[in-house]
Image: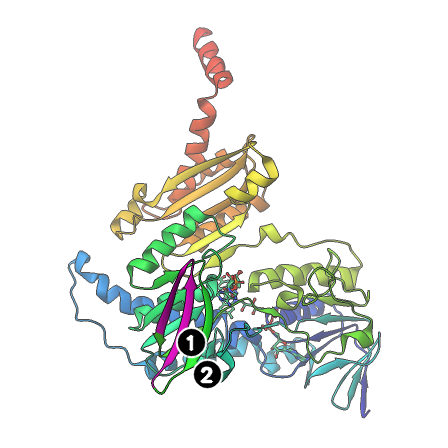
Amino acid sequence: MADILTPDLCVIGAGSGGLAVAQAARAYGASVVLVEKARLGGNALHAGAIPARALVAAAAHAQALRDGAAFGISADEPKINFRKVHDHVEQVITALAPQNAAGRLEALGVEIVRGAARFINRKALSVGDTEIRARRFVIATGARLPVPSIPGLDAVPYFTSETILDNTRKLTHLVVIGGGAVALELAQAYARLGTEVTVIENGPLLAGFDPELAGVALKRVAEEGVTLRPHATVTAIQARSMGIGVAVQNGEADQLLDASHILVAAERMPNLSGLDLEKAGIRMNKADPRLLLLSPGLKTSNPRVYAVGDAAGGQSVQAAVRQAEVIVRSAILGTMAKPDTLRVPRVVSTDPELAEIGLNEALARTRHGVGFRVTRWSYADNDRARTSRATYGLAKLITDRSGKILGAGVVGPGASELVALFSFAMTGGLRADKLAELVAPYPSYAEIAVRLGEEFRRGEIAKPLIRQWINLNKLLG
Ligand SMILES: Cc1cc2nc3c(=O)[nH]c(=O)nc-3n(C[C@H](O)[C@H](O)[C@H](O)COP(=O)(O)OP(=O)(O)OC[C@H]3O[C@@H](n4cnc5c(N)ncnc54)[C@H](O)[C@@H]3O)c2cc1C
Ligand SMILES: NC(=O)c1ccc[n+]([C@@H]2O[C@H](COP(=O)([O-])OP(=O)(O)OC[C@H]3O[C@@H](n4cnc5c(N)ncnc54)[C@H](O)[C@@H]3O)[C@@H](O)[C@H]2O)c1
């Protein structure tokens, strides 16, 4: 070994999670070594959130032209130049890359080591000729997409939810395997860019999201021409001289689709291969051996080693960033905490956007039985939505009987911004009726939060005890 480094903290992986840990640890004055085998910035910058959002934005422009007639603006069917759409996506990545550039991180005092890390024992890992003996380690190696075992899939070329973001060609008929957040937003984006799209999902579409809210998003995706097949199975894939045959079973019925391309957008799993975890005494979860065995505070079975982000089973940038704070406090200050996963917003970037925080109705029913209230407000009753003809949206506020906000869900324009507002209210411990005191610009989507507060209050006033109190006050003059 040529070099031996002995930092306070060694972070493996420079994606959203690893970068958040490294920067927070430097803020506490800890010495940090960051190991990265590919590009700084990880999935979100190069093959996830950012390129996907940029593609969705390009597709929204195409759709706006089609939807213009209702606003008195007519245009021909948009002409899509896929090469230029891809250039736009690349330009967005290039513009954001300096935030994660080596120079910026080094200026913060983070030492970067290039290469693939692997543990050599419980207290050290190696990267090429460099040995790193750190006081604490953080596995921030992200996720990978295991290929579903579908007969014939290995014999045809296919995109994954990451590689499709590099595509520069028009696709004729894209068959999407998977019906989660990533699948649906890419399906709608490709349909808007002129591709015929069929989504095949084993179970329900957008599983885990409030079905009433998800239904609003899915209805619009289907109305725009995406064929949605929930509870369907791809049974076989056949290479043909022209295109790809996809055999689908949906209940009793069998169907053979003519696809030009396939997108695999099934679950991503922690990327832990090549780390030699057993040499560090790091064990896997018995219930699901694809996952690490982790304490609530994200420590592995080796107390020197933590995991963050997708490697720890998180599935979003915001989840990784929340976990990073908890890990750094534990590793540097020795405090015990655990990330509150429910406080992390869950978002689907379809149009309309879908966003949830905290408990949704189904989770509230499981945890609180009948001891909770759902307050709704429709975008049809919001003046800003009327001006944009976006009246199909819906917001739901979930509270306990005393008005404590347990969660919120929104489907409609600006859903993720609105959910950020509810997140702030929950963090500040504001009760639902306090939302009525928010002074929102007029007309704005933020007024939906105010209306939910007023609606909640109206429900309270209707309670017999409160009515009696009001009447008593009247009698007292
Ligand atoms: C298409 C798509 C769209 C998405 N959209 C969103 C979105 O809009 N919002 C959102 O919040 N999330 C979104 N996500 C999820 C989000 O991108 C990830 O949750 C997030 O990037 C995870 O960050 P991470 O740091 O855990 O992992 P990553 O960003 O994957 O970083 C892991 C890093 O570790 C490196 N690495 C791996 N093994 C080693 C090793 N042995 N040695 C050294 N380095 C190693 C990798 O090269 C990589 O750079 C999306 C995902 C996809 C696929
Ligand atoms: N805007 C955002 O913040 C944003 C955007 C995208 C994704 N994300 C995050 O990424 C997470 C992961 O999303 P995802 O969509 O990649 O994964 P997911 O796990 O939510 O969905 C994968 C789907 O594929 C299905 N599937 C698996 N194998 C299949 C097969 N052989 N045939 C048919 N269907 C199959 C599963 O049943 C599942 O519904 C989300 O939960 C979300 O937190 C966030």
Which residue lies at the image location 59% right of the left edge and 46% below the top edge? 427
Give the amino acid type for the residue marked by disc 1 in the picture: Ile
Residue 179 vertical placement versus 468 (above, below): below
Q: Nearer the viewer, residue 125 or 228?
A: 228
The residue at label 2 has a CB less than 8 Å from ligand 2: no
For the question of whether residue 68 can be seen, the reply is yes
Whole-angstrom CA distance, mark 2 to mark 1, is 9 Å
Q: Label 2, secondary structure: give it.
A: loop
Horizontal arrangement in the rendering, residue 7 relative to residue 458 (left or right)? right
Q: Nearer the viewer, residue 92 or 23?
A: 92
Q: Quadrant of the C terminus?
A: top left
| Magenta span includes 415 | no
Q: Which mark is residue 262?
A: 1
Residue 280 lies in what quarter of the image?
bottom right
Residue 310 screen position, x and y as percent: 62, 67
From which residue to which does the magenta span run?
242-257
The residue wearing badge 2 is 156
**Which residue is rendered at x = 45% and y = 23% of the image?**
461
Q: Position of residue 64 (x, y in %)?
A: 26, 64
Q: Amino acid at mark 2?
A: Val
State the quadrant of the N terminus. bottom right
The reply to whether callout 2 and callout 1 are in contact (CB within 8 Å) is yes
Question: Mark 2: few, some, or many residues within 10 Å (few <14, many ≥20)?
Answer: some
Q: Is residue 173 shown above or below 3?
A: above
Taking 229 as reference, is 95 above or below it?
below
Percent position of residue 232, x then y = 44, 61
